[in-house]
Image (spheres, rainbow, N blue to C red):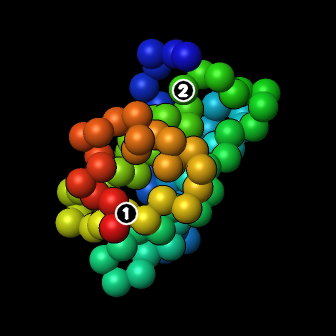
Amino acid sequence: MTDTTLSIEHDEPNGRFETRVDGHACVLDYQLRDSTMIIQHTGVPGAVGGRGIAAQLTRYALDTARARGWRVLPLCSYAVAYIARHSDYQDLVA
């Protein structure tokens, strides 16, 4: 895992958080229904895997949800596991 903080962009119209690492797109996709962020997919290509990129994307998404007063419904297995390991986000779960 790396300690490098990524520059993450929130593409709200398309329900996506994205960053590029070594030329590879790394994403977290969601849908917003009412005030609930439904996290559907976190994708990090194998070529840049193991660097904590998915964790940073997930943390950024959860922090965004908290700041906007959204609940979170994690359908993505990575997001489910992340929230289980980080109890400070469990209050967001719908």
Mark 1 residue element: strand
Q: Are marks 1 and 2 in contact (CB under 8 Å)?
A: no
Residue type marked 2: Gly
- 78 or 42: nearer the eye? 78
Q: Residue furthest bottom?
A: 34
Name above or below for residue 14 compared with residue 10.
Answer: below
Residue at image point 55% right, 16% down: 1
Q: Which residue is mark 1?
A: 72
Image side of residue 89 versus residue 57, left or right: left
Image side of residue 53 versus residue 73, left or right: right
Name above or below for residue 34 compared with residue 91.
Answer: below
Q: Position of residue 61 (x, y in %)?
A: 40, 51
State the separation of the CA atoms marked 1 and 2.
Answer: 21 Å
Q: Position of residue 15 (x, y in %)?
A: 51, 68
Q: Position of residue 30 (x, y in %)?
A: 52, 65
Image side of residue 42 versus residue 22, left or right: left
Q: Which residue is mark 2?
A: 52
Q: Earlier in the sequence, mark 1 or mark 2?
A: 2
Q: Is residue 9 visible?
A: yes
- 44 or 5: nearer the eye? 44
- 75 or 19: nearer the eye? 75
Mark 2 residue element: loop
